[in-house]
Image (cartoon, grey):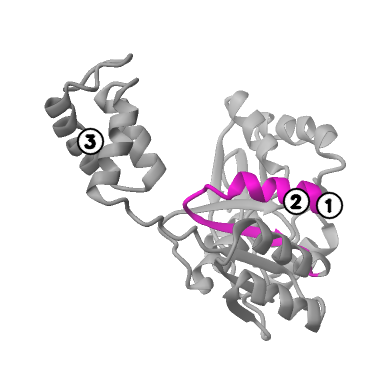
Amino acid sequence: MRPPPGLYVVATPIGNAGDITLRALETLRGVDAVACEDTRITGKLLHRYGIAAPLLQYHEHNAARMRPVLLGRVAAGEAIALVSDAGTPLVSDPGYKLVREAREQGLAVTHLPGASAALTGLVLSGLPSDRFLFAGFLPPKTAARRTALEELKPVRASLILFESAQRLADLLADAAAVLGAREAAVSRELTKLFEEVRRGDLAGLAAHYAEAGPPKGEVVVVIGPPAPEEAPAGADLDALLAEALAGMSVRDAAASVAAATGLPRKAVYARALDLGRRTGAGHGPGPQQD
């Protein structure tokens, strides 16, 4: 059955060909064309399920030229699917520009969710998943990579990275040098027969892959968040708040100290209110909440 006109962003398997949804198969059978990175890879997947949709190449090197072509066909009433070689399109690929322009032109866009290497790596890592940041591929050169890691260092969340097998040991060594002794997990061959997840601290993982050599298969690296800083004692917290209250409102001082210490903002605000009342501090610039 032919779907209504629009752009259909369709997730495909990341390794195990069985990890595709019934809705995705139904849509791929009905669209007028499928835009894909590599016609050989997508063609093999479609052939497996008896789908004969026309394939159009859409990748980093021809995206600027192909976007108006694809969106023109959607505007003319066609249904076009967008897939990547593996997993969810737009995650670490240029597909977002196609979706953005489709939205700007008022065209219908929908997503058919499915496999994602980034989320699968996070789930299997056993690291905190309540807060995470996907950083994709970091720069290949050491200096630029360390600069990127420095920018990620203060993020209080698990970090999800993609990396080539050849650069894995170097990435882990740089991460250990910049981020310190954090827990991490390296996943490879996700959803395939030889799926493997290796956990440890960054330095230990770096040493392992430096000795064992590059692993086989696609790699996802998950790095745990920084350890919570030791909460300051009451007197120390009051000293931090007193310093902040000298130039800020109670609200702003509490926000600043909470961010610096990792303590709950409401608790810090209550303490700042009490300190402000006792000392008369907290009348710096900014709106007051006391």
Q: Nearer the viewer, residue 184 or 38?
A: 184
The quadrant holding residue 281 is top left
The kind of secondary structure element at disc 3 is helix
Q: Residue at x 64, y 62 (%)?
A: 12
The kind of secondary structure element at disc 1 is loop
Q: Are marks 2 and 1 in contact (CB under 8 Å)?
A: yes
Q: Residue at x 77, y 29 (%)?
A: 68
Q: Are marks 2 and 3 in contact (CB under 8 Å)?
A: no
The kind of secondary structure element at disc 2 is helix
Mark 3 vs 1, N-terminal side? 1
Tell me if mark 1 has few (under 14), some (14-19) or many (20+) residues whose alpha carbon lies within 10 angstroms of its own: few
Which residue in the protein does label 1 denote? Answer: 141
Describe residue 247's horizontal placement relative to residue 76 as left or right.
Answer: left
Q: Which residues are magenta?
A: 142-165
Which residue in the protein does label 2 denote? Answer: 145
Which residue in the protein does label 3 denote? Answer: 269
User: With respect to residue 229, does 59 lie above or below?
Assistant: above
User: With respect to residue 19, does 289 lie above or below?
Assistant: above
Describe residue 282's horizontal placement relative to residue 44 as left or right.
Answer: left
